Image (cartoon, rainbow, N blue to C red):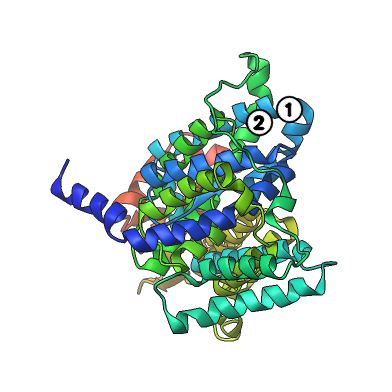
């Protein structure tokens, strides 16, 4: 191992011990009700989500590519498993989790983490804003039809979270919020909804088991669609969250290693009775805002979670949900990009449309993958349209009136192919035509077909045609795909 690698690992694990341990404890407490809720969404016992959160957090801390990011059981993956659990049962869920992990490992080795290059800043902003809204919406069941004391406790919790840092930052204010509100609820005998009301906490350690399913092609046909969906959604959310944590901490992450880490975590989780998961932006924000930066924070969150539910379950179960709701409201407020609202007037209209579309689709469908893919698709359409507008063709006629030179500038691809074809005057009687593409680049089969059509039409009318200025890449695609210099090209044109 190189000295640089050892130094980096030492910094990731030991560079912020106190901050990572304290933030890990806060995250562990906040993970419990969420893991239980996600288990309920998937239609399985609460321990399935709790064991998963422990396993995924610990393994991604070791094998992931983004220090300080929290991964666990999530709603994004849980909702994909509902039908599978209902129709086939828990064992098929565990098998699908293992297969999803293997697919994610393969994605990492295929270096699919680089797809993040195609996600624009507008999509990222929309993703963040949508998540902030969804996090807040997830708290509404704890704020509707509850005793009035709940609102007082939530307000008090928010006051502690935002004001306590003015006293000291030595202890994360969310942790102080949990301790103070729990103490108040006990001393005053408040009748409030608690963590224990979410579901029974397990009292034993997870054990290794192999999913009890028949190893047949039919089984694979059942679980593969679910596994593929979970793998794709899990990686998309994880890579987007990693990028956000990169920006928050001004550090870089290894996206391909994160794919592998997520895959290893899900594969192992399926063998200890846990459901699939991925990175969690809400918990990652709690971790970063509580001072967590290294791998130790995520590892500690997983270990503390297991200790809390197995050893200290009776104590954890009395924590009022109001304390955790206050923390999640803080997360939603801190996650939302408030500047994006003011920027709607200043940013290009296309960027604002992409951002808003990502938010609306994500919130409407409650599916982060669909929202992000909508944003990426719109970004691509707007980009293609913008580049196509920068394309132009000018021409000049020789002194003898028998040779016309067409100068092509810009990117010649499917969106500009029509403009290219429309730029030529095929009714003009000429002896020679020169198509100068020195300042252009030919990208795809649509542009090659447009070039073919122009050359063959001029030749049909008796003109000699020369194409000059092809750069190396353009020459390669033209040589491979063009028809105009191949036998029978004119007949094929006439046939069309």
Front in this rendered view, residue 180 or 239 = 180
Q: Is residue 279 above or below residue 273?
A: below
Q: In the image, residue 345 lies at what x, y percent?
A: 60, 86
State whether residue 355 is above or below residue 308.
Answer: below
Q: Is 254 situated left or right of 208 in this image? A: left
Q: Residue furthest left?
A: 3
Q: Is residue 332 left or right of residue 26?
A: right
Residue farthest right in this picture: 145
Name the residue: 40% across, 50% down: 255
Q: Nearer the viewer, residue 394 or 280?
A: 280
- SS for tag 2? helix
Q: Which residue lies at the image location 35% right of the left edge and 74% below the top edge? A: 399
Q: Quadrant of the C terminus?
A: top right
Between 318 and 129, which is closer to the camera in this rendering?
Answer: 318
User: What residue is shown with label 1?
Assistant: 89
Looking at the rendered image, the quarter that the N terminus falls into is: top left
Q: Residues within 10 Å of mark 2 (few under 14, many from 20)?
A: many
**Could you tell me if the residues under marks 2 and 1 are in contact, i.e. CB atoms within 8 Å?**
yes
Question: For mark 1, does the 10 Å Cα neighbourhood hold few (<14), some (14 to 19), or many (20 or more) residues?
Answer: some
Question: Does the rendering let one see residue 433?
Answer: no
Q: Position of residue 80 (x, y in %)?
A: 68, 41
In the image, is residue 334 above or below residue 195? below
Q: Residue 93, labelled with which disc? A: 2
Q: How many marks?
A: 2
Residue 362 visible at all: yes
Q: Secondary structure at mark 1?
A: loop
Give the x, y percent position of residue 65: 37, 49
**Picture quadrant where residue 212 is located:** top right
Q: Where is residue 324 drawn, in percent x and y?
A: 63, 63
**Which label belongs to residue 440?**
none
Residue, x 30% and y 52% (percent of image)?
A: 13
**In the drawing, does residue 253 fall left or right of residue 235?**
left
């Amino acid at each position: 191992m190189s000295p640089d690698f050892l130094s980096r690992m030492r910094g990731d694990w030991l560079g912020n011990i106190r901050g990572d341990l304290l933030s890990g404890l806060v995250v562990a407490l906040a993970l419990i009700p969420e893991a239980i809720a996600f288990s309920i969404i998937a239609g399985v016992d609460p321990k399935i989500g709790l064991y998963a959160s422990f396993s995924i957090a610990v393994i991604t801390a070791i094998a992931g590519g983004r220090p300080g990011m929290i991964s666990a059981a999530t709603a994004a993956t849980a909702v994909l498993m509902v039908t599978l659990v209902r129709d086939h049962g828990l064992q098929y869920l565990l098998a699908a989790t293992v297969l999803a992990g293997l697919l994610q490992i393969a994605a990492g080795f295929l270096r699919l983490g680089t797809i993040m290059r195609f996600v624009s800043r507008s999509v990222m902003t929309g993703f963040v804003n949508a998540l902030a809204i969804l996090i807040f919406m997830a708290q509404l069941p704890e704020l509707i039809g509850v005793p009035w004391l709940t609102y007082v406790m939530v307000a008090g919790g928010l006051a502690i979270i935002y004001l306590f840092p003015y006293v000291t930052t030595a202890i994360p204010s969310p942790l102080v919020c949990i301790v103070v509100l729990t103490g108040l609820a006990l001393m005053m005998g408040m009748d409030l909804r608690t963590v224990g009301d979410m579901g029974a906490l397990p009292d034993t350690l997870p054990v290794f088991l192999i999913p009890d399913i028949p190893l047949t092609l039919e089984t694979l046909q059942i679980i593969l669609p679910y596994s593929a969906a979970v793998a794709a959604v899990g990686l998309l959310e994880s890579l987007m969250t990693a990028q956000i944590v990169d920006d928050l901490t001004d550090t870089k992450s290894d996206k391909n290693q994160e794919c592998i880490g997520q895959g290893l975590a899900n594969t192992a989780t399926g063998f200890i009775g846990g459901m699939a998961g991925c990175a969690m932006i809400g918990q990652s924000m709690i971790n970063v805002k509580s001072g967590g930066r290294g791998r130790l924070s995520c590892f500690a969150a997983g270990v503390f979670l297991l200790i809390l539910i197995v050893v200290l379950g009776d104590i954890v179960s009395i924590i009022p949900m109001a304390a955790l709701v206050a923390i999640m409201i803080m997360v939603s407020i801190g996650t939302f990009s408030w500047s994006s609202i003011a920027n709607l007037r200043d940013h290009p209209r296309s960027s604002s449309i992409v951002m808003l579309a990502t938010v609306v689709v994500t919130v409407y469908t409650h599916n982060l993958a669909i929202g992000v893919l909508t944003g990426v698709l719109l970004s691509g359409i707007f980009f293609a349209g913008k580049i196509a507008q920068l394309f132009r063709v000018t021409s000049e006629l020789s002194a003898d009136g028998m040779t016309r030179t067409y100068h092509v500038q810009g990117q010649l691809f499917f969106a500009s192919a029509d403009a290219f074809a429309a730029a030529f005057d095929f009714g003009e009687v000429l002896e020679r035509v020169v198509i100068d593409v020195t300042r252009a680049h030919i990208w795809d089969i649509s542009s090659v077909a447009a070039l073919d059509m122009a050359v063959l039409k001029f030749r049909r009318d008796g003109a000699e045609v020369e194409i000059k200025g092809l750069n190396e890449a353009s020459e390669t695609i033209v040589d491979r795909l063009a028809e105009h210099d191949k036998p029978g090209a004119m007949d094929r044109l006439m046939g069309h």
